[in-house]
Amino acid sequence: MVLFGLCSFLATAVYISVHASFVPLPRASTPVWETLPPTPTLPGNPVGTKTPINGVQIWHAEFGVRDPSKLPVIMLHGALASSRWWGKEVESLMKKHYVIVMDTRGQGRSTMDNTPFTYDLFAEDTAVLLKTLGISKAAWIGWSDGGNTILSALLNPRIAPMVARGFTTGANHNPDAINATYGDAKIVDAVVDRVVSEYEALQPNGNLTRIDEALTELGSTQPMWTKAELQKIKLGPKLTLSWGDHEEVINLSEPAFMHDAVPNSQLILAKNVSHFGLVQDPTQFSAILEKFLA
């Protein structure tokens, strides 16, 4: 999924909106699924650490206390966003769990090289980071592109054993699963302005055109999983597939298709939120994630 799965419309809009003013947030009477609350900060606004991985520098930060009796948690963000978007959930989960967040290559505070983006490459980056931290298994939580990264990890025999539990929100099995009319949603304009502004702040020496081209190529050609391929995922009920019940980016047929395709997976439709539910209702998302980790 490119730029939160918004494909060519959002890719074009990114260029248009680079110097545009921020779209005002909706009024309080607006339904939650049409709002875009401010992007949270990570607890303590950490400096974080950059680690050389697969030719780039991957930024990560750690929260909570490492407990050998509990699975570590790693959280992956959506396209052109950063780990900050998980800030409220991290604040909640870190009270009981050891949580790691990372910025995907080329996004947030992580660098990129000339290697074409693939979800398998993102999964490799994640696996190497965990190994660097001395972690052999973790609970992987991913939003949008982050969710696709988890599914890619589960389909890679070398990485799948490192995913003890998996939680995806807003994932898709192929580019055709992206809603062709998502551009009609008013929230899209605000999201475009938001992620562009944040990218420029976190990557003052970054190249917006370059990252946009890389993400556009990724989202327009990947993933390309068939039902038969998804049936090979063997995590069973330890894999939760979720979407917002007012999902505007992914086709509304996707939850049923994916849940049916992945054997014994769990399905959750978060209430009264859209593709951006993690910032629209972090209290609900945190409760869902706590139950997933229990």
Image (cartoon, grey):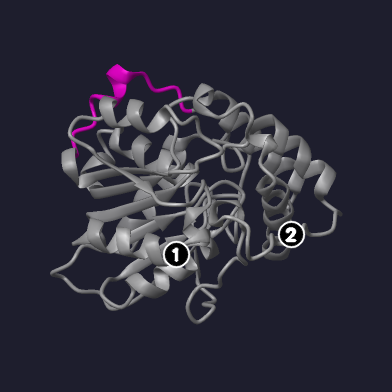
Q: Position of residue 286 (x, y in %)?
A: 36, 64
Q: Is residue 51 among the parts visible in the rendering?
A: no
Tell me the tag on residue 282: 1
Quickly name the residue at label 2.
197
Which residue sits at x=68%, y=63%? 27
Rendered image quadrant of residue 137: bottom left
Q: Residue at x 32, y 19 (%)?
A: 227
How many C-alpha atoms fall within 10 Å of the one at disc 1: few (<14), some, or many (≥20)? some
Q: Which kind of residue does numbered mark 2 sit on?
A: Ser
Three-letter amino acid code at disc 1? Pro
Q: Which residue is drawn at the image coordinates 43% and 63% (left, top)?
A: 101
Q: Quadrant of residue 242?
A: top left
* Residue 265, horizontal then vertical, whole percent: 22, 37
In x, y percent, where is residue 117?
55, 36
Secondary structure, mark 1, is helix
Label 2 or label 1, whichever lies nearer to me, is 1
Q: Residues within 10 Å of mark 2 (few under 14, many from 20)?
A: some
The vertical placement of 250 against 129, above or below, is above
